[in-house]
Image (cartoon, coloured by chain):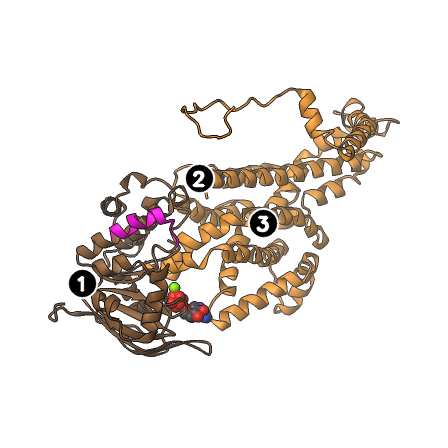
Chain colours: A orange, B brown
Amino acid sequence: MSDHFVRTTHAPAKPAPRIQIGWVRWARENLFSSLLNSLLTVIAVVLLVVMLPPFLDWAFFSAVFSAVDGSACRVDGAGACWAFVEAKFGQFLFGRYPDAEKWRVVLTLILGIAGLAPLLIPNRLPRQWLVAYLLVPFPILAFVLLSGGFFGLEKVETSDWGGLMVTLVVALTGIAASLPLGVLLALGRRSEMPVIRMFCVIFIEFWRGVPLITVLFMSSVMLPLFLPEGMSFDKLLRALIGVALFSSAYMAEVVRGGLAAVPAGQYEAGKALGLTYWQSMNRIVLPQALTTVIPGIVNNFIGLFKDTTLVLVIGLFDLLGIVQSNSTDPTWLSPQTATTGYVFAAFVFWIFCFGMSRYSVFMERRLEAGAQR
Amino acid sequence: MDAQKKTMIEIDHINKWFGDFHVLKDISLSVRESERLVVVGPSGSGKSTLIRCINRLEAHNEGRIVVDGIELTEDLKRIDEVRREVGMVFQQFNLFPHMTVLENCTLAPVWVRKLPQKEADELAMSFLERVRIPEQALKYPGQLSGGQQQRVAIARALCMNPKIMLFDEPTSALDPEMIKEVLDVMVDLADGGMTMICVTHEMGFAKRVADRVIFMDEGEIIEIKPPQEFFESPEHERTKLFLSQILDN
Ligand SMILES: Nc1ncnc2c1ncn2[C@@H]1O[C@H](COP(=O)(O)OP(=O)(O)O)[C@@H](O)[C@H]1O
Ligand SMILES: [Mg+2]
C-alpha cells in the first residue's frame, strides 16, 4: 500500500448512497431514538388509547345527526347533538339577518373573495389594482350591501347582524386596516421628524398598554358620554374602529422589527439612485421588511381573529356569542347542546386560523425559493 | 489635464462633525470634467464620509459643495437633482436582493427618470453587456459571485446616465480572484471619459487611471499629486509612512 493520497486516475462521480427506508427505521429514528423519546411515545400511545375511542364515540357513533328538537339528544348516553348545529346553521352564519336578504351577505363574500383570492395565489395580475380595489371600492360596496338603506336595499340594522358574518366583518376590517396603519406607524416611529415620531410612539404605546376588552368597553360605554347629545354612531362601527386601532399598534411593532432588519445600505442605495423616500420604501425597504416578518404578521392576524370573540362583552353576537346564546334555547335543551355548539365554534375558528398559518408557511417557502438569499 | 474643461465638483472649505468628532477638517477640492481621482488613506480617515457628502448621503456642516452647478443645501429638490447626476458604488454592493439583476438596473430609470419599462430594459441590457454579464440578467443577486454582483452594481448606477461616479472601496469585499474583473470595468469606464472619484487601495489601478491621487489622514487632505509623483516622491512624512505600510503587505 502506498502511504500518500495523490490520485493517479480521475475519480468518477458516484451516486449518493441510498438512504435506507422502511417503517422500522422510521420508527426507530422518530419514536424511539432515546430513552426519553421512547417514554414519551409510550405515554402518547396510552393517552390516545384512553381518549380517542370515547371521543370518536361521542362525535360520531352515539351522535345525533338529525332531529327536529332536542329530545333525541336528551336520551341517556347520547353523544354530540349535531342536529342542533344543523338546525341553527343559518343563525350561526348570519345571526338575525333577514332570510330574504341573505343573498347580500353571500354577494359581499363573493366580491371579497374575488379581490382577495388572486392576491393570495401567485400570478401575474397587477397587484396594486387588487389592493386598491380591496381598500377602497370593496369596503364601500360591502357597507352598502350589508347595511342597506340605499338603492332600494332594505336597511338591516347591525344589531341584527351576527354569527360568523360578524366575526369575519370585525376580523377582516381589523386585518385590512391594521396592516397599512401599522406600516405607517412603524415608519413614523423611525421618522427623523420629532413630532411625527412622538405622535407614533405615544399612539402605539397607548394602544398596546390597554387590554382589548377595555377598548371595547370604552368604545361602547364611555365614547357616547363624550359625544354631543343626540349624536350617536353605530355600536359595530365603534367596535370596528377600536379593534382596528388596537391591532394596528401591534402590527406597527412587528413591522418595526422588519424595518430594523433591512440593512442601512439598502436605504443608501435607494437614495444614491435618486429615489424619493416613498419610492425607496415601497420598492426596496418594505418588500424586504414585510417578507421577513410574515410569521409575525400572520401571528397578529390569528390573534386578532380570535380576539373578535370579545365583542360579546358589548352585546355584539359573533360566532361564539351566537352559539352560546342559542345553546340555551329550550327546544334544544340537553346536556350535549352547549358542548356540541362550542366544539363546532372551536372547529370553525381552528379552520380559519390553521388556514392562515399554513398560508404563511407557503408564502415563506415561496419567497425563500424565489430570492435564494 | 485640460484647463478648459469645466468644473464638475467644487468643494469649498467644508467641515463636518459626527457629534463632537471632527471627521472632515477644512477640505477643499475641485474636480474637472472627465477627471479621475483616487483617494487613499488609513481606515477611519474620513474618505467615505467625504465622498458621501458629494451625493448628500452625509450632510456637511460648514462650507459649500457645488456639483455640476447645483449647490447642495437642505433643499430636497436640489439633493434629488444632484443624486440623479451622481452614481455611487458601495463596498458591500447594496444590490436589492428581492429583485432580479435586470429589475435592479431598471428600478431608478423607470421611477426617477420615468422611462417606459421597455426602454429601461433595453438600456439596462446595454449596460449589463458593457460590464460583461448580460447572461445573468434574470438571476437574483444572491445567485451571483461577489465580482458579478459588484459589476451589476456598477451597471445599475450607469443606467441613470450619471455625469460623475463615486466608488467607495469597490473591491475591498471581494475575493482576490474577482478584483480584476471589477477593476477592468472601472478602467473601461475611465477610458470612456467618466468623471470618477474612487476610494481604493488598488495601487495598480491608481497608477493606471488616476489623474491625481489624494492622501487623507485624520479628516484632512494631506497631499494631492499625480500618481507617479505621489508614489515615487511623496512629500509628507505621513504619506511616506502610509505608503510604506501598504506596499509592505
Ligand atoms: N454615522 C457615523 N456616526 C458617527 N461616526 C461615524 C459615522 N460614520 C463614520 N464615523 C466615524 O468617522 C470616521 C471616518 O469614517 P469614514 O469616513 O468611514 O472613514 P474611512 O472611509 O476613511 O475609513 C471614523 O472614525 C468613523 O468611526
Ligand atoms: Mg470607508
Q: Is residue A192 magenta?
A: no
**Segment colored magenta:** B173-185
Q: Earlier in the sequence, mark 2 or mark 3?
A: 3
Looking at the rendered structure, the secondary structure element under dot 1 is loop
Point out residue A98 in the picture as x, y percentages from the top left corner.
62, 40
A230 left or right, relative to B126: right
Q: Nearer the viewer, residue A344 or B31?
A: B31
* Mark 3 C-beta to ligand 1 under 8 Å: no
Residue A296, labelled with which disc? 3
Looking at the rendered structure, the secondary structure element under dot 3 is helix
Q: Nearer the viewer, mark 2 or mark 3?
A: 2
A326 left or right, relative to A128: right
Indicate whether B13 appears above or below A15: below
Mark 1 Cα-neighbour bin, 10 Å: few <14, some 14–19, many ≥20: many
- For badge 3, the amino acid type reads Gly
Q: Which residue is at 24% across, 67% downward? A: B232
Q: Quadrant of ligand 1?
A: bottom left
Indicate whether A12 appears above or below B216: above
Badges 2 and 3, same chain: yes
Give the Cα separation between the discs numbered 3 and 1: 51 Å
| Disc 1: which residue | B34
Indicate whether B248 appears above or below A20: below
| Disc 2: which residue | A370
Indicate whether B62 appears above or below A180: below
Q: Chain of mark 1?
A: B
Q: Chain of mark 2?
A: A
Mark 2 Cα-neighbour bin, 10 Å: few <14, some 14–19, many ≥20: some
Q: Nearer the viewer, residue A96 or A252?
A: A252
